[in-house]
Amino acid sequence: MSNTAATPGYTAVLDGRVLRVTITNPKRKNAIDYDTMAGLGETVLSAYENPAVRVIVLTGEGGDFCTGADLAAGPGEAARGITPEQTMDVANRMIKAIVDAPIPVIARVKGAAAGVGVAFALAADLTYASEDAYLLLAFINIGLMPDGGAAAMVAAAAGRPLAAEMALLGDRLPVTEAARRGLIAGVYGDAELDAKVEAAAAKLAHGPRRALELTKRALNAAALTSLDAALATEKTGQAELLRAPDFTEGATAMLQKRKAVFAE
């Protein structure tokens, strides 16, 4: 891994012992396409065997974290022959890369964390957010189901009732409430957010790598026992829904900024 890598959609900069991965599509609130998702997964995986990397900080450029899949990119991806199953595979690979990483991952969340962006935020070991941030499982609003293991991670941290409310109603959850329910580690003002992230990254970057790896493994074994099953179930269900008329209507309506009219 070079000290700096930039591809369309994100950058990865090795800053001392900290790998800073930033989604760079602010005009689209850091929505991500297939290639960006695949590249992000590969970048995180490549850090596994690099002794120079001791912690990863994942964030978004500008005022938002990540609003999930870029619906505007969908037709082009379909024209390239990318199937729903392949889309789900790269999403699941990214989530597993974060969860299984032998080094800690910090999510720095500002503004919107929506769709699979919620999964990115919750898959991290430490999630710190700005006061204006929110979590939104918006899938149901476009005829889809949550993916990236997001619903499973919400249920693991805060219980099935909150997971059901977020997944079935598709409403915003302010991060103050997310923190109160145990979904994220803390909420801060903008200046305090950066200070908290940097302090945590600095401490982890100089911590005992093997002990941190085994501690992370134990925490995940206790809290995320259902994640693999959830990802498999999501792949099957989401692949079906991505081919359904309701998704076509939901995605079109969102791009046209109108209310979706789903089949009776």
Image (tube, rainbow, N blue to C red):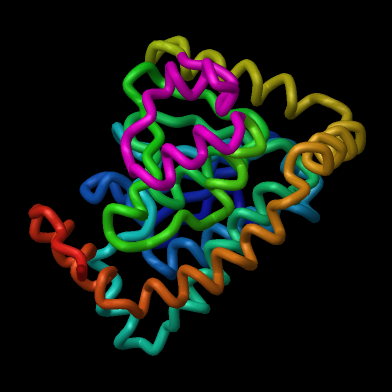
Rendered position, 92 above or below 100: below
- The percent coordinates of residue 175 (x first, y second) are 42, 23
Rendered position, 204 above or below 120: above
Q: Quadrant of residue 42?
A: bottom right
On the rendered structure, is 53 left or right of 78? Answer: right
On the rendered structure, is 209 left or right of 161? Answer: right
At x 62%, y 61%, the residue is: 231
At x 57%, y 71%, the residue is: 89
- The percent coordinates of residue 78 (x first, y second) are 33, 83
At x 32%, y 37%, the residue is: 171
- The percent coordinates of residue 244 (x first, y second) are 32, 77
Rendered position, 214 above or below 9: above
Q: Which sits in the foreground, 35 or 259?
A: 259
At x 54%, y 46%, the residue is: 151
On the rendered structure, is 258 left or right of 69? Answer: left
Residues in magenta? Answer: 158-187
Q: Which sits in the foreground, 46 or 249?
A: 249
